[in-house]
Image (cartoon, rainbow, N blue to C red):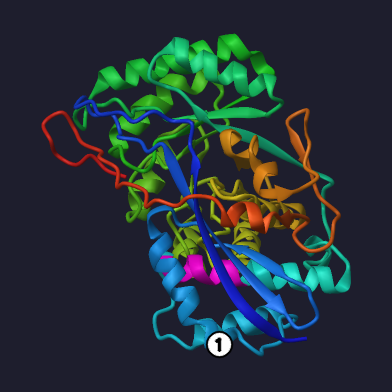
Amino acid sequence: MKITAVKTYKLSVPTGQEIDDSKTGQMHRSTTKTWLLLKLETDVGIDGWGDATGEWLVPMAEAALHDWIPLLLDRNPLEVVALTEDIAARSPWKGGPVFGTALAAVNMALYDITGKAWKVPVHTLLGGKRRDRIRCYSNGGNYTDPVKAVESALKNKARGWAGTKGNPLEGRTWPMDMAAVEVSCDCVQAVREAVGDDHEILLDAHGSPIPELSIALAQRIARFRPLFFEEPVKVGSVDALAEVSRQSPIPIATGEKLFTVEAFRPLIDRRACAVLQPDVTHCFGITTMLEIARLAEYQQMLMAPHNTCSPVGHAATLQADAVMNNFLIQEVTGVYFQCYDRYADHDWVVADGHLNVSDRPGLGIEVKEIDIAAMPYQRMPYRQYHHEDGSWKGW
């Protein structure tokens, strides 16, 4: 078997968000999100799909994939890890989001082809699934005021998700804005009272507050039992992350902005947090995600992979989740999931907070190529994320 063609498709899908043009410190949002899909064709009629969704990185990741066409054509796609590592070895630069995102798509597509060729799901190639269903929560919780927070959480609970993740502290207007802590605390309390004890609360501060503000929030809301507090500090200081973990009564999670095993290793070695969140579309694919999970398992850390991607990346993530010993819960973007069937044929069903693990060959989906080829594309606008005085407040 040989690879005979390499194709890419980029498209924009609705986010369900409204653009916020205020000057109050809120993050400006975009109404669409860009996906970049990779298709590898073979001489035996078996195709494989990968996801190189990098949001603002789509043009760069697509350029990398096209640059690698000579490295992919006429190669045996069944040599998944060897071929992926061969491409990585060709460059002296081993990390970074563009490289990791492009190579992730290749890795997924090769696994997809191999599973289809052997007529088995990818989780069988990876050693066999440990679970038949994946516990999932939806992001998209609104933490601007308690009424909106409750509304979004109840909507996710009614749709069958195990929990709702929202973004606390987004409205802060300066680094030590305790009023933002109060608003976030009110939102968390209102959500817990509305959803009861059988729906998880998850928090994501987008890696922008200073440690002291995140610690203050964590200590205030611990009594409402959030499952974890994600990215409470900026990426870059393991000491800051470890300090928040030490003082927070809520488990701390991070990892979506890290791409290599080497980047995760300091966090794992120090057990600087409780939960790791690599994204399969950025961390060089399924192979590397599972390597990170195995290293984390030695430190008794749990895995809750990041996921805001297309049905292709979603499928790859679930295949990896199925074989992890230390899996905790999976992120799903509910607004995207509701329209996945427009872009791919799949057999996922939300039930009792879980998604089923597909036993279809390969990644378990069939991309609707004609439909995605007809989708429009526009570059995502860069976000504005400022304090009230105009200074940049993080991301």
Q: Quadrant of residue 164?
A: top right
Residue drawn at point x = 56 percent, y = 49 percent:
309
Mark 1 lies on a secondary structure that is helix
Q: Is residue 6 above or below residue 351?
A: below
Helix, strand or loop for the magenta stretch, by majority: helix
Q: Where does the image place residue 55, in percent across and percent down from the top left?
A: 43, 53
Residue drawn at point x = 61 percent, y = 19 percent:
155
Q: Where does the image place residue 364, in percent across and percent down from the top left?
A: 78, 56
Closer to us: 303 or 373: 373
Q: Which residue is mark 1?
A: 71
Split into 4 quadrants, where in the image is the N terminus?
A: bottom right
Split into 4 quadrants, where in the image is the C terminus?
A: top left
Q: Is residue 297 above or below residue 74?
A: above
Point out the residue furthest to the left here. Answer: 389
Q: Which portion, as a residue range, is magenta?
A: 98-106
Q: Where does the image place residue 118, in percent across and percent down from the top left?
A: 87, 73
Closer to us: 240 or 141: 141
The kind of residue on which mark 1 rests is Leu
Q: Is residue 107 above or below residue 55?
A: below
Residue drawn at point x = 58 percent, y = 57 percent:
373
Crowd class of label 1 (few under 14; some 14 to 19; many from 20; radius 10 Å) = some
Q: Where does the image place residue 40, in percent across and percent down from the top left?
A: 65, 73
